[in-house]
Amino acid sequence: MTVNTATDPYLTGAIERQRVEALYSRLPGSIASMLLGVAVTFALLMPTGDEDLLKIWAAYMLTTLALRGWIWHQFRTMDIDIAQLRGWEWGHALGMLLTGLGWATVCGALFPTEAHLQNYIWLMIIVVAYTGVVLAATSRLSFVLFVTPTLLPALWRFVELNHATMAALIGAAGCLAVVGVMHQSMHSLLMKHLRKQVEAEQLLVEQNAIFQSATVGIGVFEGSRLIKCNPRFGELFGRTLHASTQLPSSELFADQADASRFADWSSAEFEAARTARTMERMRRADGSQFWAELSGRRMYYGDVVRDLWMISEAPVQGREK
């Protein structure tokens, strides 16, 4: 079995694909949240601000969101090679940068003079920055290009309005630090999750390949019923895979006495937490018998108990012993 490491090219590429796909999977939510923010900001600033400038800002933001939606659609419909993933991440980051520049305008030319509207702007910028933390959690590039134009002008304005007092400077620095730490924490958490997910998927593929191509018969039993087997298992007993799973396990033994004795013995071995190994007379579909070497162990899935057996035809020397 392949042991995946940090230098495994397949594993690294699969994680990178999952990372960028996770980034784009959050894009519709990002567009929807930004659209809501633009609508609310436009409605609140319209009565008090420069109407023409506000309309230009709204048109710019809507155009940017439409561009990001088009990029998302292209990503979903195209067959993307691993070598192209970095370019698609830059495409996502460009959309985030353009959106961030739009929010920077709110703390610049569009910044209101009324105190209650200023409080709204502070709240909106904090919410927008937090949205960037969450929706760009798998990409440091997108996060930096979004938060830098969004948050820094707002913090500069905040410090300026408070006459650059020490409290204002500490508050601005603290806000920036909190946003950075939050993103780093979410990024690390999501990357660990993606790595475990990719490793689990790869391990499942490898295990299935081993199961299907093994030169010994492998069967999984739940009680006395065979629920899963590989092709070699069917070949040993002269049955198709479907036919094998329709029979009770007792039909695989030379006679019922052997089946009962084997069931009692294997249960005792499993209860003692041992791997069961033995040799038994088995029966094929045509009635012919053969000696088989069996090795099994018990598996627990919550309340479900299953037994996995590996079966191979015993060599002549083994039968004589």
Image (cartoon, rainbow, N blue to C red):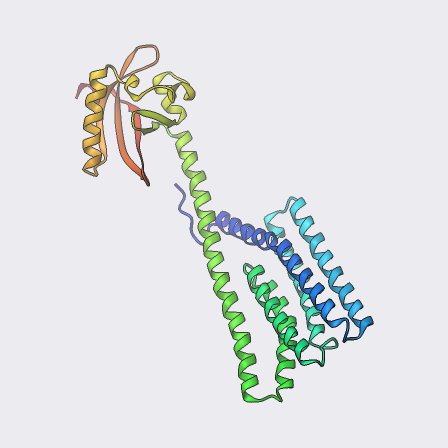
Q: Nearer the viewer, residue 126 or 231?
A: 126
Residue 192 placed where, x, y %? 45, 56
Residue 50 placed where, x, y %? 80, 75
Residue 186 placed where, x, y %? 49, 62
Question: Which residue corresponds to the image point at 73% horizontal and 56% vertical from the top-left?
Answer: 66
Residue 212 placed where, x, y %? 42, 30
Quarter location, residue 179: bottom right
Q: Nearer the viewer, residue 157 or 113?
A: 113
Farthest residue to the left: give it: 321
Question: Which residue corresponds to the image point at 50% horizontal and 49% vertical from the top-left?
Answer: 9
Q: Nearer the viewer, residue 294 or 223?
A: 223
Left or right of residue 140: residue 229: left
Identify the image quadrant of the C terminus: top left
Identify the image quadrant of the N terminus: top left
Question: Which residue corresponds to the image point at 34% horizontal and 25% vertical from the top-left?
Answer: 226
Whether residue 317 can be seen here: no
Q: Nearer the viewer, residue 177 or 281?
A: 177
